[in-house]
Image (tube, rainbow, N blue to C red):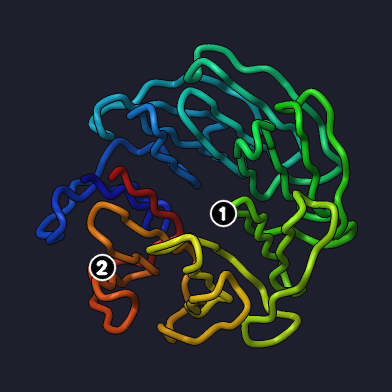
Amino acid sequence: MKYLVICFLFFNISVGAQFMYWNQLEDLKPNEIEASTNGNIYAISSLNSMIYKSSNDGDSWTEIFQGGNWKSLKTYGDTIIAGTSDGKLYISTNGGETFYLSKTFPSTINCTEIADINEVNFVIAGTSANGVFISTDFGNSWAAHEFNGKSVSSLKIINDKIFLGTLNSGLFCSSDLGISWVQKIISFATETVLSIEQGESDSIIYVSNPKVYKSLDSGESWFLIHDVITYCIRYSTSENQIFAGYHMSADSGATWRKVFSKGVVWLTIKD
């Protein structure tokens, strides 16, 4: 298993679960990285206006698409979805060989999500000022779904439910594919939700607001498990470990230990 981390915009890789050492990789200046299910790893760099691809666990990187000021990245298999600060959403369906412009939204694309639900190809885009947009035909057409005027900061589909985090407006959940939304208060109604991650089962969810909270009942109730500011939460299915900020927990959040020496702003795990 590999862990790829951005620490204050430095890009590092650790080998093995004990985190005995770290190797700094090429200076890609990435702001997000994603390990895809096809075995490749992808990164976006707003400073370099570039999307990168690695086929050898981050040892070397290839420039695959130069676009704009990249702000969001999501991958699944050979599908790559990347959004820019000026609202452009690009999609690749062949692992980055080619990209096409799917849509230009009215504001920055902060986050994206992909899922196949009931044989429907969903693509979701969360924007900085115009709420969330959903496509049910893989980006050919789009519809606005609530939250106009709000900034969407995080998206996650868990057990066919869409979880949506906002800046200063809380966490919301849709059980009907975006038609209606219910607020799920973590600790207060106007909280900022920076990261949403599925845990050990479909009903276990971890979020940062920006402290780390856990739900055992699909977001109906929450309890604090880590009182540390966290920008990114990731769960390793193969190791049953949770990563949040500097720290890692191997016992479902009961105890934590420091595993990174620098502040982590983005993390991806290749199980």
Q: Is residue 49 left or right of residue 149?
A: left
Q: Is residue 130 visible?
A: no
Looking at the image, is 175 positioned above or below residue 167? Answer: above
* Between 129 and 91, the one nearer to me in the picture: 91
- Residue that lies at the very extreme toward the top in this rendered image: 97
Q: Residue at x 42, y 84 (%)?
A: 225
**x, y percentage for residue 247?**
31, 72
Dot 2 crowding, Cα within 10 Å, few <14, some 14–19, many 20+? few
Looking at the image, is 221 positioned above or below residue 84? Answer: below
Q: Is residue 136 left or right of residue 33?
A: right
Q: Is residue 256 visible?
A: yes
Dot 1 crowding, Cα within 10 Å, few <14, some 14–19, many 20+? few
Q: Secondary structure at mark 2?
A: loop
Q: Which residue is mark 1?
A: 159
Q: Is residue 82 left or right of residue 256?
A: right
**x, y percentage for residue 107?**
81, 45
Which of the 4 image quadrants contains residue 65? Answer: top right
Looking at the image, is 144 positioned above or below residue 252? Answer: above
Q: Check disc 2 and give the amino acid type.
A: Ser
Q: Is residue 269 left or right of residue 156?
A: left
Q: Earlier in the sequence, mark 1 or mark 2?
A: 1
Q: Check disc 1 and give the amino acid type.
A: Asn
Q: Which residue is mark 2?
A: 261
Q: Residue at x 77, y 53 (%)?
A: 176
Q: Residue at x 23, y 57 (%)?
A: 239
> For residue 218, which numbered disc appears in the image?
none
* Between 36 and 205, the one nearer to me in the picture: 205
Q: Secondary structure at mark 1?
A: loop
Distance in Å between CA atoms under marks 1 and 2:
34 Å
**x, y percentage for residue 41?**
37, 33
**x, y percentage for residue 4?**
31, 47
Q: Residue at x 43, y 82 (%)?
A: 228
